[in-house]
Amino acid sequence: MALSVIRTNQGLVQPSKKTPSGTLDLSIIDRLPVLRCNARTLHVFRHGPGAAQVIREALSMALVPYYPLAGRLKESSHGELQIECSGEGVWFVEASAECMLDSVHYFDDTASIPYDELLPDHIPEAEGINPLVLMQVTQFACGGFVMGLIFCHSICDGLGAAQFLNAVGEMARGLENPSIAPVWCRDFSPPPPQVPQTNPTVLPNLPPPMPDYQLQHANIDIPLDQINQLKHEFQKSTGQTCSTFEIVVASIWRHRTQAINLGENTQVKLVFFANCRPFLQPPLPQGFYGNCFFPVTITASSETLARSSTADVVKLIQEEKVKLSNEFSRWLKGELVEDGVDPFAPPLIYTTLFISEWGRLGFNQIDYGWGAPVHVVPIQGSAIIPVCIVGLLPSPKKGIRLMTWCVEEAHQQPFLDLMLKSST
């Protein structure tokens, strides 16, 4: 998709008032090496004339209560990740495009989106800065706009990032303070005990072998009435209820396994990340915006999974979810480390399917003064890690959009055919 975007202004946006300085510790989850990355998203809005100026001012106001986001990452003398509350600010880019959003179908076709044009470009090296948040607001000729966002995962999970953006939206709509006051509270658990190694084996520091496959992108849309039908069939066959997430994920894992047609007794894994805020004692206060999640990993034989019904796979998912609170507690105590298990390091191979749920994070409800977004587009992080993002259909449609990068080309059509057959 050809798109001409002109970046007209860029620079740091600092908090509108003086904010506390000093160093803040991050939590044991924030400090995980796997989170030393950026999450990238596009937020498409039908209306919003003059959005860049409005959002820029609101961003400056929201950074007063959320002042750690205006700081920088640093390492302590012990090598632990921290936040230096410097008040330097976040990177903000104003841009414009001459076309109308409806002429590009509101970027409904995610495979052809020119991401590099809509995300903030690389900060010039001469600036010598590395902000935690980068934002670009691109105004379109129709009056709509697209927000391109790059967020440091070490300081917020999806729920936390959405909470911050909601505060920006409230400031843009005229509120003086966010309806939910942010809370740092990254000391909710002490570091787990280190397990001494009696005879540690020194291994060569070699990179893992690169997979020889390339994952293909596909959107799979499941309208609400089809989801309700699948849930009704599950209830009819089992006498129990299930969530939308459970029935949809069971279907995609089962059909992907059938499509890739692995050899007998091959172990396949399903990994998804669950919010663990409800499991802490004492509970985390409302307003916490750090990382607090835990991976749920389910392992099955490919042959068994391929022959199972969707209802059987839903039950597998439900059984593992019941164990979540206990497994999270054991990890916080260091017991899983003692067992030699790192739940945050599942194998990044073709037999592992990663699921990320975006529909319930709150991004689709954020309003900067012109209503909620048409849709939110998470951007693929890797071409070799099989992933499915469970999002919402673009407004005003109701249902689920599965944004997938989970099969190579040879398996793409069989996978799509199975998914289509299951939802009709």
Image: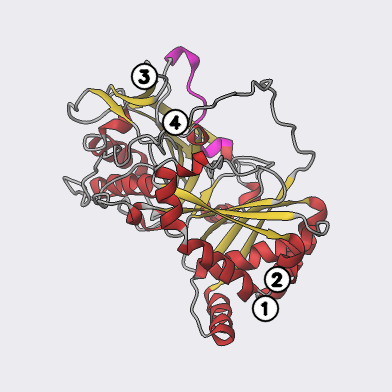
Query: Badge 2 is on which residue?
Result: 420
Q: Residues within 10 Å of mark 4 (few under 14, many from 20)?
A: few
Alpha carbon distance from label 3 to label 1: 56 Å
Give whichever of discs 4 and 1 has the lower sequence position: 4
Q: Could you tell me residue 208's position as x and y percent? A: 70, 31
Residue 260 at x, y percent in the picture:
78, 57
Q: Nearer the viewer, residue 83 or 303?
A: 303
Q: Which residue is mark 4?
A: 194
Q: Nearer the viewer, residue 52 or 192?
A: 192
- Marks 2/1: CA–CA distance: 6 Å
Query: Disc 3 vs disc 2: which is toward the camera?
Result: 3
Please give the residue where the numbered disc 1 appears in the rendered image: 424
* Residue in view at x 34 percent, y 32 percent: 26
How is the protein colored in the picture?
secondary structure
Disc number for residue 76:
3
Where does the C terminus fall, quadrant-wise? bottom right
What range is drawn magenta here?
116-127
Q: In the image, what residue occupies the spot 64% across and 20% down?
A: 202
In contact (CB < 8 Å): disc 2 and disc 1: yes
